[in-house]
Image (cartoon, rainbow, N blue to C red):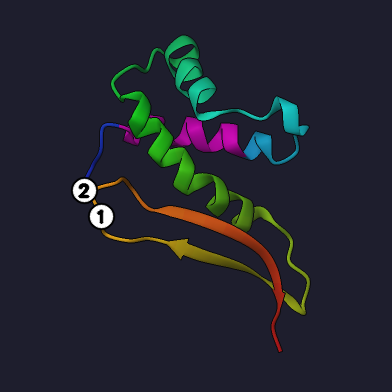
Amino acid sequence: MPRATVLDPAKGWIDAMLREDLTAPRKQKHTARRIYQRLAQNHGFDQASYSTVCDYVLVRRPRIALSLSSASDDHKPCVTPLCRSSASGPCAVACTGSVPMK
């Protein structure tokens, strides 16, 4: 069981914003900074730091996009994790699109 984080109460709100972004025009999508601001303004949530919100958005945005995308029968979505254990920062996930699977 994953341990609880300070961001747990806000994860549902963040995921909802990221789902809205899937159909929004490119210029109207939420940045991590705007998500952080909306959490404080609209939901009164200010317990998490900006960097915590950024880290969560960095991981969740591609996962939500993949979970809600409609892949055709002969193409499966492909995700390549770019994780390395270093002191430079958290892992990133890169979306590489669809790859034909035979």
Toward the bottom, the furthest residue is 102
Residue 95, relative to residue 37: is it above or below? below
Q: In this figure, what is the number of numbered marks? A: 2
Identify the element where label 1 is drawn: loop
Q: Where's residue 79, x and y in %?
A: 55, 65
Identify the element where label 2 is drawn: loop
Q: Amino acid at mark 2?
A: Arg
Q: Where's residue 28, x and y in %?
A: 71, 25
Mark 1 and mark 2 residues within 8 Å of each other at the beta carbon: no
Q: Which residue occupies 75% across, 38% down?
A: 23
Q: Is residue 32 left or right of residue 51?
A: right
Which of the 4 quarters of the picture holds residue 98? bottom right
Q: Which residues are magenta?
A: 7-18
Residue situated in front as seen by the camera: 24 or 80: 80
How dense is the environment of label 2, judged by Cα within 10 Å: few (below 14), some, or many (20 and up)? few
Q: Where's residue 42, x and y in %?
A: 50, 13
Q: Quadrant of the N terminus?
A: bottom left
Q: Which residue occupies 65% across, 54% down?
A: 68
Q: Which residue occupies 31% across, 24% down?
A: 49
Q: Is residue 90 left or right of residue 37?
A: left
The residue pinned by badge 1 equals 86
Q: Which residue occupies 77% across, 77% down?
A: 73
Instruction: Examine the residues drawn in magenta and state their main secondary structure.
Output: helix
User: For residue 16: magenta?
Assistant: yes
Which of the 4 quarters of the picture holds residue 25? top right
User: For residue 15: magenta?
Assistant: yes
Q: Quadrant of the C terminus?
A: bottom right
The residue pinned by badge 2 equals 3
